[in-house]
Amino acid sequence: MAVLNKIRQRSLFLIVVIALALFSFVLADLFKSGSAFAGSDNVVATINGKDITREDFLQKVEVMQRQLGPNATNTQVMNRVWDQEVRKAVMETQFEELGISVEKDQMRDILKTALANSPEFLNEAGLFDENKLNEYIANLKETSAEGYSQWVNYEKTIASNALQQNYFNMVKAGLTGTLAEGELEYKLEGNKVDIKYVQLAYSSIADSLVEVSKSDISSYISKNKKQYEVEASRDIKFVQFNEVASVEDENEIKKELTDLLKDREEYNSVTKANESVKGFLSTTDDEGFVNSNSDIKFDDRFLFKSSLPSTIADSIFKLNVGETYGPYKDNGYYKISKVVAAKQVPDSAKVRHILIPFIGAQSAQMDVTQTDAQAKATADSLLAVIKADRSKFPELVTEFSSDKGSVENEGRYDWHPYNTMVPEFNDFEFEGNVGDLGVVKTVFGYHIIEIEGLKEKQKAVQVGTIARRIEPSEATIDKVFRDASSFELAVLDDKDFDAEAEAQKFVVRPVNGIKVLDENIPGVGNQRQIVRWAFEEGNNVGAIKRFSVTNGYVIAQLVAKHEKGLMSVEEATASVLPIIRKEKKAEMLRDRVSATNLDDLAASQNTSVRTASAINMKNPTISGAGREPLVVGAAFGLSEGETSELIDGNNGVYMVQVTKVTPAVALENYQAAANRVEQQKMNVVTSKLYNALKESADIEDNRVETQIQ
């Protein structure tokens, strides 16, 4: 319903203004300096032969930006729309091949389900009224072309969702778990073997003894191309210069706070004479003093010990009224706190109330017609009735109170802690006595309140706190600028980036594998400007640039450019080297073995014969050796008493002898296991079907040029 409400309430003028602003501002990042798309200027992508046009894509980006709000970045918005459009195109290909669609009658049923709880489409009996929906659509079509267009898009969206659900259900309907599959599933878990084995661990050969050449790695990449296909990416490194307060800055802030404690002489330019100004310790106007000298305004609430920061709670509660604590550091501020007042306050209260709103009150509904004075008069008259007969309170709640959250509970708010309610309400209930009745005005209207219970009075304090934000001084900011400039000039003068950083005691941070549509730089945050620069045409490896970032600067160097295609040997080495090394170790271990039985093998290799019991195929783990699917599979291929050849496993080379075969107990019926198999297949459909369709789709992505402008 949020979609419908937005469609109904949004004015055409506002839509046009927002659209123009978003088009010029939000999209400027990825469409700067001409087209951000390769190929045809008007085609963002082609998916299974279907084009996604630039105009349609940008329109959806604008709508998505409005939905996600200003906190969503350009790239996040565009990627969200991209994912939606790819899914839509991939699924539409399947719908067309199967010839399934949503017809008019089906669409009405879908809308009826989607809008079944929308008040504007319900009749007096609370049932969905199709005539009201027709009237709404007709009115929208007549009064707002933009609103009607968005309604059409809404219909398309829910129709597409319904088709996808139908498609998934059709696939699931074609999946069954046969009795044969159920029997196999049962036996994979129930069939057991006991084995004796010898493991020649790969770890017995030092890595240094295994030579792996670049050609070995290159050959492996060529044989496994799909695993090593990569997008274009860039590697950079950077030094960050943060504008943060120095020790001297913090000491100066603490001194300024400490000076505020004492009385001082101050020149008055009006009277042209020195005046005595009271300090925080002696002032009687604590609220005014705090508001004049603090970055955080005075908080007049009384607080229990549990409501204070745990690091200072004990210290504050030990103070007498008028005494101070600090300076202390808290959440980015230095603070001095003074106990202004103390009293005993119940820690929880139970009340019931009737709320009478007035025009303009917070949360007042459109049907509220009483003015402030009229609402006050109503509240006073209800108070008089209740004082005369308190038993009438529940029925008056039902008839008059606008607080829907408490009406069903006779206007009651059960036990709740101090400072839960708005200040005026809180003051009445916690400063009164059980049985008190009164009218209290808050931002929500006039409340007739009865205090039904108070318990466990505890000490509460009112604390005045002078807070100063911990910020760098102008001198510190100037120094950061000089440091950044000095480093930048040095590395631009052909000095080695790392060596110069080390000489100046700066930390170099590498960031590898940056993709063209990325926006986040670890440690710096959202920095599309750095990503754009890394991919700009003409920037060669070694290029250096300064960037202004939040609270400082970044000096970055382009370290490497990786083009789309197969990983280079250098990039793949980390993942391929262990695989090839393991293969070569297996070969070396085999070459030194001549034994054909377990005892001889163990003796010749100075190891022992080990045992493992109750191994099954469902969980192919060998006690003492770890997960070894190939070895376990080979064991199940042996007869009782039979010994295997050497087997290359995950953790070593093995020889296995089966000592006992224990078949699973035969069942009369394997339907339960078959049902489990069917459910497993269904779960796979939910989690993997779309990704499989997407992987097999023909997707030509033209969102970004090879070089970003």
Image: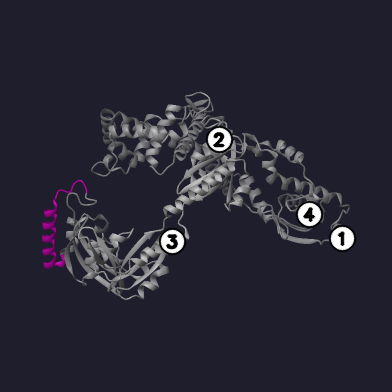
Depth check, mark 4 against mark 2: the one in front is: 2
Q: Of the numbered discs in the image, which one, if any, rests on residue 210?
A: none
Q: Mark 2 or mark 4, which is nearer the start of the sequence?
A: 4
Residue 523, x across and y down, in percent: 52, 49
Residue 684, x across and y down, in percent: 56, 44
Amino acid carrying label 3: it is Glu
Seen from the viewer's position, the closer of residues 645 and 297 is 297
Q: Mark 3 or mark 2, which is nearer the start of the sequence?
A: 3
Decide if residue 204 is on the left or right side of residue 418.
right
Query: Label 2, on which residue?
Result: 535
Seen from the viewer's position, the closer of residues 98 and 639 is 98
Q: Mark 1 or mark 4, which is nearer the start of the sequence?
A: 4
Q: Of the numbered discs in the image, which one, if any, rests on residue 603?
A: 1
Measured in 3D between alpha carbons, the distance from the residue under mark 2 to the one under mark 3, in whole angstroms, is: 41 Å
Seen from the viewer's position, the closer of residues 455 and 116 is 455
Mark 4 secondary-structure assignment: loop
Magenta residue span = 365-391
Q: Residue at x 32, y 44 (%)?
A: 117
- Mark 1 neighbour density, 10 Å: few (under 14) some (14–19) many (20 or more): few
Q: Of the numbered discs in the image, which one, if any, rests on residue 250?
A: 3
Amino acid carrying label 4: it is Ala
Query: Label 4, on which residue?
Result: 206
